[in-house]
Image (spheres, helix red, strand yellow):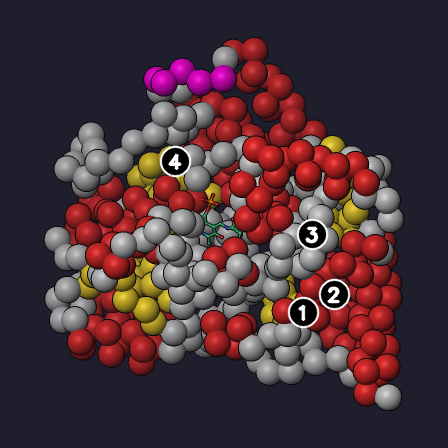
Amino acid sequence: MNTSNSEKLFRRAKNVLVGGVNSPVRSFAAVGGSPLFISRAEGSYVYDVDGNRFTDYVASWGPLILGHSHPSVISAVEKRLPLGTSYGAPCELETDLAALIARSFPSIEKVRLTNSGTEATMSAIRLARAVTAREYIVKFEGCYHGHSDFLLVKSGSGATTFGNPSSAGVPKSFVNRTLLARYNDIDSIKKLFAKYPQKIAGVIIEPVAGNMGVVTPEKNFLKQLRSTCRKHGAVLIFDEVITGFRLARGGAQALFGVTPDITCLGKIIGGGLPVGAYGASGEIMGMVSPEGPMYQAGTLSGNPLAMAAGLATIKELNARTYRRMENLTNILVSGIREIVAELGIAVTVNSVGSMFTVFFTAERVTDYAGALGCNTEKYAKFFRNLLQNGVMFPPSQFESVFVSAAHTKKQIDQTLQAIRASLLEISQGEKNQKS
Ligand code: KE4
């Protein structure tokens, strides 16, 4: 596969962009090789600057649930563009998106829109502290909630991918109020509440983790978390930046029937343009400026182009679309399980809705330790083989694969052929090593 133009552009990029990228996980540093520079994307395909076409399962890390350049999204942004790009003043589209979010999430009465998921979760933590007048927060090992200082502790996604789950540059004083619990282990939470009585402001969790790779909550875990937080007067924050409008129109909280106090959103609600949001009851959100004493702001928050793209995206998401994406995902995941069983490769696949991860381990992956036990070298080889076979998975073991509404059964079948060829090479490599 010729990638000479990408390599040339990467060399140029590295002169002025740190690592040649604007987000570390795009650098391919975890999987080897030079990152592909994309020239255009349409439907479920991305095209690199060397003219190679790939069936895309990164979906810009989640936002492109309809696939790339969906006609409704493009047309909505094209119609909006001549009216201006940003006003720094209220625009009706912001109310329209906030109202759509509130209609989709019964736990949300009022919303604040931001420009990223990081801003949304950072603000939600500040809000939990403002509401409770407490200082400690709890996050789960392996969950990633963006890069605000106090949440960069044993974080997943790129932080784990590059071996710095607790980042340099974050003073100890910034994280000494951040406590860590273990995913799917309710006792680890109960112990923290016992050790820090009346001190924990909030608990933040990815209700389905996407940043260890996909890790699903075990039976009753979220329900027990909900009751434990309520018992101790702590705010429960669902970080649904990935799962919001991904797993269902009402996100993971609809799927699992557990209601958080604050919900964070992002990705899909911007349709591929910069966005984030946090929302809760009117009472809780009443703490946020200008109604209340908790300050948070943003020059481009509620940007009309992002609002137009987000509204157009969500309007296309109906029960039939979700069912179709889930059916295609189940075909893909079942096919992978059959292939690895036939080839005798140690792989576990975790899957929910239209998101899944292929973990290179024989063990179940139910928490961060399980994810860290995976063979990331094998994942890297699998990733590179897939690229050679025209399929783009996320360039890290600790991310989610996303099926979009643009994928077809034919493409899923083709992807399974590419996966078989990619895994066969690994299996043969293992056999050669043994002989
Ligand atoms: P952003 O600040 O990147 O918009 O959102 C941060 C965030 C918050 N919460 C969850 C659950 C998230 O997954 C994210 C960001 N996700 C990563 C990929 N897993 C973004 C990709 C990247 O960092 O380049």
Mark closer to the observer (3, 2)? 2
Seen in the image, is 90 located left or right of residue 247?
left
Tell me the kind of residue under disc 3.
Answer: Tyr
Q: CA distance from mark 3 to mark 1?
A: 20 Å
Residue under the image location 48 percent in, 57 percent down? 159
Mark closer to the observer (2, 4)? 2
Q: Which residue is mark 3?
A: 57
Q: Which residue is mark 4?
A: 114
Q: Callout 3: few (<14), some (14-19), or many (20+) C-alpha neighbours within 10 Å? A: many
| Disc sitting over residue 321 in the figure | none
Residue under the image location 32 percent in, 53 percent down? 170
Task: Confirm or deny contact between disc 3 and disc 2 (CB under 8 A).
Answer: no
Tell me the kind of residue under disc 1.
Answer: Glu
* Lower sequence index among marks 3 and 4: 3
Residue 173 at x, y = what percent? Answer: 22, 57
Tell me the kind of residue under disc 2.
Answer: Lys
Tell me where the magenta segment starts and ends, as one range. Answer: 85-89
* Lower sequence index among marks 3 and 1: 3
Q: Is residue 364 magenta?
A: no
Q: Which residue is mark 1?
A: 377
Task: Confirm or deny contact between disc 2 and disc 1 (CB under 8 A).
Answer: yes
Q: CA distance from mark 2 to mark 4?
A: 37 Å
* Lower sequence index among marks 4 and 1: 4
